[in-house]
Amino acid sequence: MILANLRPIVPGNARGPALKVESLSFYGEVDPVRGVLVADGRPIRGRILVIGRSRGSTVGSYIIYALKYYGNEPAAIVMTKSEPIVITGAIIAGIPLYEGLPREVFEAIRDNDCLEVEERGVLRKLGHC
């Protein structure tokens, strides 16, 4: 089922379970060595990271790169609206990044929903990953 047509910032195909976060600062809220969200220990590796909004310092770009360096990167990042820190990190790490996720679609996505995003920006919900 097609959920949305997104704008590719860093194009690439990806598939994986959703990891939904309302608000995220990569600096301080992501442990790149362990590959988890600090607050609750949810794993990031291989997931479609769905972010309502991001915030934080420029160090966030390096945290995104560190996720890749340690092999803990998400399969893709999908956002309602991207910002320069996340864009820079996704570019240097080669992680697919998409923006333009409608708020109502964000609200409907649940953790572990199987998602697929195509290079051209089509976001789908699949039956299984």
Image (spheres, rainbow, N blue to C red):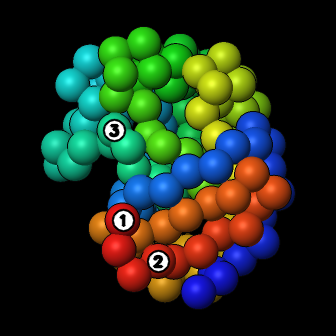
In the image, residue 71 above or below residue 75:
above
Element class at badge 3: loop
Tag 2 and tag 1, C-beta contact below 8 Å? yes
Location of residue 78 with respect to 66 vertically, above or below: below
- Label drawn at residue 129: 1
The answer to the question of whether label 3 and label 2 lie on touching residues, with beta carbons closer than 8 A, is no
Viewer can see residue 76:
yes
Question: For this view, does 33 lie left or right of residue 109?
Answer: left
Screen quadrant of the N terminus: bottom right
Residue at the image position 64 percent from the left and 81 percent from the top: 3
Residue position marked by numbered label 3 in the rendering: 45
In three-dimensional space, the C-alpha distance between marks 1 and 3, rounded to whole angstroms, equals 14 Å
As helix, strand or loop, the secondary structure at mark 1 comes to: loop
* Viewer-proximal residue among 108 and 38: 108
Q: For marks 3 and 2, give the one nearer the viewer.
A: 2
Q: Tell me the crowding category of disc 2: few under 14, some 14 to 19, or many 20 or more residues within 10 angstroms, Cα based.
A: some
Q: Which amino acid does the dot numbered 3 rest on? A: Arg
Q: CA distance from mark 3 to mark 2?
A: 19 Å
Is 34 on the left-hand or right-hand side of 105?
left
User: For the residue marked with disc 1, what is the amino acid?
Assistant: Cys
Quadrant in the picture for residue 66:
top left
> Which label was assigned to residue 126?
2
Q: Which quarter of the rendered picture does the C terminus lie within?
A: bottom left
Please state which of residues 84 and 118 is positioned toward the viewer in this rendering.
Answer: 118
Is residue 7 toward the left or the right of residue 95 in the image?
A: right
* Mark 1 vs 3, N-terminal side: 3
Q: Position of residue 7 (x, y in %)?
A: 82, 57
Residue at x 64% of width, y 26% of height: 94
Q: Nearer the viewer, mark 1 or mark 3?
A: 1
Q: Residue at left 49%, top 56%? A: 15
Q: Position of residue 114 (x, y in %)?
A: 40, 70
Q: Are marks 1 and 3 in contact (CB under 8 Å)?
A: no
